[in-house]
Image (spheres, coloured by chain):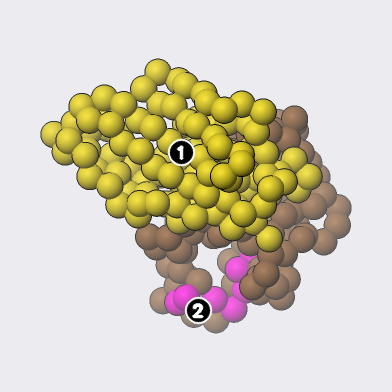
């Protein structure tokens, strides 16, 4: 079955700096890769996603890149702000199953 | 996006009892899933709720412990049976949109077993 690894488990950055979170997946049939942000006591919220026919997608300060050959994808947050502090989860799924397998999560702390 | 309502939002349960969580979606969705998130952990898929038939369980989860129903396209229930403290978790209902693309989560049901 699909396995998703995520690194790092914790990440501290200074406000205004960039943050990068990386995930690798095992199932070559995976074709959809969303990223979720979970604030303390809240449900996961979708922040950006990418499909396998696209190499990069950007939405304001957030971008995701995908390398299908290497089976890894990354979340990039630029000009980080304290409100970006949360736990971020990557996930992978394939259109055949629609099941989402989540990474282990990254706790991001943006220091003011 | 789909709006997913879950209840109860929070409960404290006695060891050995069972609790049923309800999930209601405001629009037709293709797939509904139940996830568990143990304290400080990631989300683990329990099962796919299939309309009108038995749920499809992931490895490590069984129907006797987590019976699931989905009588129609927009409603599902998860029962946590014979609870022990190890079942203390957040249980999240989720659903994909009609195109089967994006997955959305309910607010979660925070269960504490004492």
Q: Position of residue A63 (x, y in %)?
A: 44, 27
Q: Position of residue A9 (x, y in %)?
A: 35, 54
Q: Which chain is brown?
A: B
**Residue B84 has which mark?**
2
Magenta-colored stretch includes residue A60: no
Q: Which residues are magenta?
A: B78-86
Location of the N terminus of chain B by quadrant is top right
Residue B43 vertical placement versus B13 (above, below): above
Residue B5 in sight here: no
Find residue B47 and report its image quarter.
Answer: bottom right
Is A81 on the left or on the right of B81, as rendered?
left
**Residue A74 has which mark?**
1
Front one among B37 and A33: A33
Residue B70 vertical placement versus B58 (above, below): above
Front one among B4 and B62: B62
Judging from the image, mark 2 belongs to the subunit labelled: B
Residue A2 in sight here: yes
Is B61 on the left or on the right of A65, as rendered?
right
Q: Residue at x 63, y 61 (%)?
A: B46
Q: Residue at x 58, y 51 (%)?
A: A25
Location of the C terminus of chain B by quadrant is bottom left
Of all residues shown, which one is farthest toward the left? A112
Magenta-colored stretch includes residue B84: yes
Q: Residue at x 39, y 62 (%)?
A: B39
Q: Colour of chain A?
A: yellow
């Amino acid at each position: 079955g699909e396995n998703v690894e995520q690194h790092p488990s914790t990440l501290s950055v200074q406000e205004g700096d960039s943050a990068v979170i990386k995930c690798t997946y095992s199932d070559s049939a995976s074709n959809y890769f969303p990223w979720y942000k979970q604030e303390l006591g809240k449900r996961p919220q979708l922040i950006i996603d990418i499909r396998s026919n696209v190499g990069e997608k950007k939405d304001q300060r957030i971008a995701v890149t995908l390398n299908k050959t290497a089976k890894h994808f990354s979340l990039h947050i630029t000009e980080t702000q304290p409100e970006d502090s949360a736990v971020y989860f990557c996930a992978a799924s394939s259109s055949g199953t629609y099941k989402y397998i989540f990474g282990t999560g990254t706790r991001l702390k943006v220091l003011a | 996006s789909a709006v997913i309502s879950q209840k109860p939002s929070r409960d404290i349960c006695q060891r050995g009892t069972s609790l049923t969580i309800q999930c209601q979606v405001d629009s037709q969705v293709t797939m509904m899933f139940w996830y568990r998130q143990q304290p400080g952990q990631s989300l683990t898929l329990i099962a796919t709720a299939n309309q009108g038939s038995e749920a499809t369980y992931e490895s490590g989860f069984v129907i006797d412990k987590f019976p699931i129903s989905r009588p129609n396209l927009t409603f599902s229930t998860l029962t946590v049976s014979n609870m022990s403290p190890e079942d203390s978790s957040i249980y999240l209902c989720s659903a994909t949109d009609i195109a089967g693309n994006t997955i959305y989560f309910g607010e979660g049901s925070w269960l504490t077993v004492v």
